[in-house]
Image (cartoon, rainbow, N blue to C red):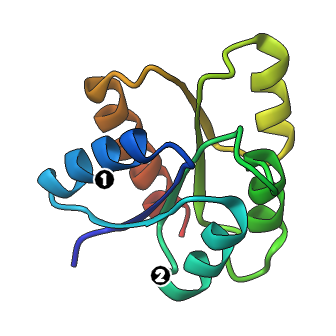
Amino acid sequence: MADSILVVDDDPDSLDIVRTFLESRGYDVATATDGKAGLARLEEVRPALVLLDVMMPGMDGWEVARVIKNHPDFTDTRVVMLTARSGFSDKQEGLRAGADDYIVKPIRLDELATRVEKNLEARTSST
């Protein structure tokens, strides 16, 4: 069975590019367009990895990451921030929120592939 990945991003173009790319690599991909919908999908899908935008309406990605990492059922779920917020303080905030990794937009698909593989391997080795 393919690892399942949840992509949460309010930009439909980014969401579509990432979903299509990951599906072409054999992953089972679910999507959500905001933080609250992302948390609802998390319960349904129970993904191994969440790719999470920061700047979204309502609940931002940092808040979603904190909820995921503080939930007893999802402590081993890997969270990767996928955002245009590229400053050092933004990366620090992501790590404080519990993110396991941080990818800056615009997305380079080769980098995305490598980071997804590394995070899924890290999850497998820790469970």
Q: Secondary structure at mark 2?
A: helix
Q: Residue furthest bottom?
A: 44
Task: Say which residue label 2 marks.
Answer: 45
Marking on residue 127 = none
Residue at position x 32%, y 49% in the image:
16
Q: Is residue 33 left or right of residue 108?
A: right
Task: Say which residue label 1 marks.
Answer: 19
The crowding category of the residue bearing disc 1, from other C-alpha atoms within 10 Å (few below 14, some 14 to 19, many at least 20), is many
Residue at position x 70%, y 82% in the image:
73
In this picture, is 78 found above or below 108?
A: below
Count of marks placed on residues: 2
Q: Position of residue 28 (x, y in %)?
A: 28, 69
Q: Position of residue 108 (x, y in %)?
A: 33, 21
Residues at badges 1 and 2 in contact (C-beta under 8 Å)? no
Q: Residue furthest top?
A: 87
Q: Secondary structure at mark 1?
A: helix
Residue at position x 47%, y 81% in the image:
45
Q: Is residue 86 left or right of residue 90?
A: left
In this picture, is 37 found above or below 17?
A: below
Q: Is residue 71 left or right of residue 111?
A: right
Residue at position x 50%, y 22% in the image:
105
Q: Position of residue 70 (x, y in %)?
A: 84, 68
Residue nearest the observer in this picture, 42 or 92 = 42
